[in-house]
Amino acid sequence: MTFAISAEDEASNQRMRDRRMVGHPKGLHWMCETHIDAARELTHLKWPEAKAKMKKDIKVSSYSWYHPLSVIKYVAKLANQ
């Protein structure tokens, strides 16, 4: 899921592309199926703002954002498509 980023972060991402560097682009975040719908509504925000809003609105713990089991289930689901 891609969220809004600052001009400075976009410049950083562009430098990485120009240099053919491998790394995690700024503004890109993985969402489990529990949070994907809420996240889609907030992509106009920067990640810290979107995460704070989701935590407040759907009252989730920070642990659930990157729960390893969620990742495994998601990868398995993709493999079975």
Image: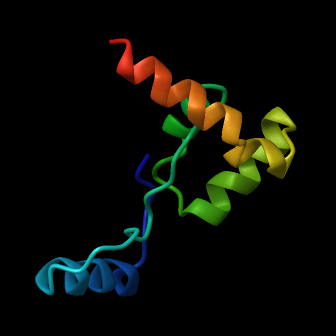
Q: Residue at point 46% right, 52% down?
A: 44
Tell whether 3 sits left or right of 49: left
Q: Residue at point 38% right, 12% down?
A: 80
Whether 7 is drawn above or below 27: the answer is below
Residue 63 placement (x, y as % from top left) = 82, 48
Residue 52 placement (x, y as % from top left) = 75, 55
Whether 78 is drawn above or below 40: the answer is above
Tell whether 15 sits left or right of 81: left
Residue 71 placement (x, y as % from top left) = 58, 37
Q: Residue at point 28% right, 85% down?
A: 11
Q: Residue at point 68% right, 42% down?
A: 68
Residue 22 placement (x, y as % from top left) = 29, 74
Q: Nearer the viewer, residue 60 or 69?
A: 69
* Quarter occupied by the C terminus: top left
Q: Nearer the viewer, residue 12 or 79?
A: 79
Q: How is the image coloured?
A: rainbow
Quadrant position of residue 38: top right
